Amino acid sequence: MMNVEDFACYVADEAYKILSDELDINMMQVRSSMKNNGTKTHFVTPTRQGDTVSPTIYLDNLYESYKDGKDIEDCVNELCEVVRENIGKGQELKDVGKMFGDYEKAKENLKICVINTKLNTELLGEVPHVNVEDVSLVFRVIVESNEGMTGSVLVRNEHMEHWGIEVNQLYEDAKTIMNKRNDTVICSMMDILRDYIPSEELKSTEDRDFLKDEMYVISNRSKVFGASEPFYNPSILDKLGEEMGDLYVIPSSIHEVIVVSKELMSYEDASRLIQSVNDNEVEPEEVLSDHPYVYNAKTHELTMKDDKVEVESEAVSENVKEVNRKSRTH
Amino acid sequence: MDKGKAKTELPVGFLFSNSKRTIEIENQVARNASKAFEAYAKSRIGKS
């Protein structure tokens, strides 16, 4: 069984042999890049003479299929098929080069995203960022293709050097553009789940009312990288705070957060729930955090936890010591 | 279906490259978060 690097090189080499004459490909490069939360992705880039833009085909799913028993030659054939479908596409994206050469063009397409600070120390060394509590705000430039694809480019330190700007300016400009774009979507969990949970599972009117009136999802229209808003603009929680009091902001993923009243569960229960969902239902590279954030409806601040929770944590620790002492005496 | 036969979805992005810079353009595709949402919703439904 090959490791992922050897697999990527093998399928790329074999695909090149098949396609170089057929599609006039002069090179099939294999690269890897660091993604969110320390995950690494491997991709192949077939290039043709004269093309400024080449497709990048990510191979990690294919490697998983190979490990699950897919024949290596089937893997090569699938890669060839995707190369055939995508070679030559995206040439209109060559304007992205001009965009990254000129900050005034790039800033109109800025987007603020949020990632976990501790899980991304290596990546954060390569990108401009603003730390908020235990998460970091990073920046992307949105790029649209003629064929309806929406892509994004992570802003890196080398881009900042070329633009000649500091992170403070990037942050202020990004906030201005995000506010102007007005892309935030707040909707009830009931609306989100209407198509997912069979109606018999919504046992009572009380359940449905809860999901309609007391649990909200905050993201953006594209549902991608939409979890950042409460962290750079907590005022979007003001209206919900007026209705529900202090809130838990639950980091569902890097793409959205869920908001509920702080009265509904303890901080520890909320943390356990988040950890369980992260472990079972969220891809590792999309995990944002393993605990809720607390929005104070009076001060309008969003923080990691409040003082009351810190006192409770000490009490929990003492209880655990007592339970351990008792269990050792049996 | 035999895992070996099922077609694998391969995400595609783009790479811009000229003499000055190389830029990786990642395709933004919304994923299906229904299972996570369901887990959070049910954590409350059971308690109401």
Image (cartoon, coloured by chain):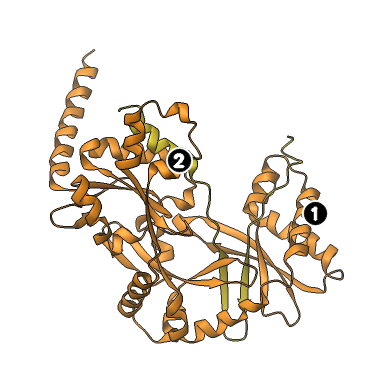
Instruction: Write down which chain is painted yellow.
Output: B
Residue A71 higher or lower than A91, as above or below: above
The N terminus of chain A lies in which quarter of the figure? top right
Query: How far across and how far down the image is residue A211, in percent?
Result: 35, 38
Residue at x 66%, y 55% (from the top left corner):
B10
Q: Amino acid at mark 2?
A: Leu
Number of other residues with Cα within 10 Å of mark 1, as a class: few under 14, some 14 to 19, many 20 or more: some
Q: Nearer the viewer, residue A91 or A156?
A: A91
Mark 1 or mark 2, which is nearer the start of the sequence?
A: 1
Which residue position holds label 1? Answer: A77
Residue A252 higher or lower than A105, as above or below: above
Q: Is residue B45 left or right of residue A61?
A: left
SS label for mark 2: helix
Residue A67 visible to an observer of this rendering:
yes
Q: Amino acid at mark 1?
A: Asn
> Chain A drawn in what color?
orange
Query: How far across and how far down the image is residue A158, in percent?
Result: 46, 79
Which numbered mark, 2 or 1, is in the foreground of this view? 2
Residue B21 visible to an observer of this rendering:
no
Mark 1 belongs to chain? A
Specify the quadrant of the image occupied by residue A145: bottom right
Q: Which mark is residue A193?
A: 2
SS label for mark 1: helix
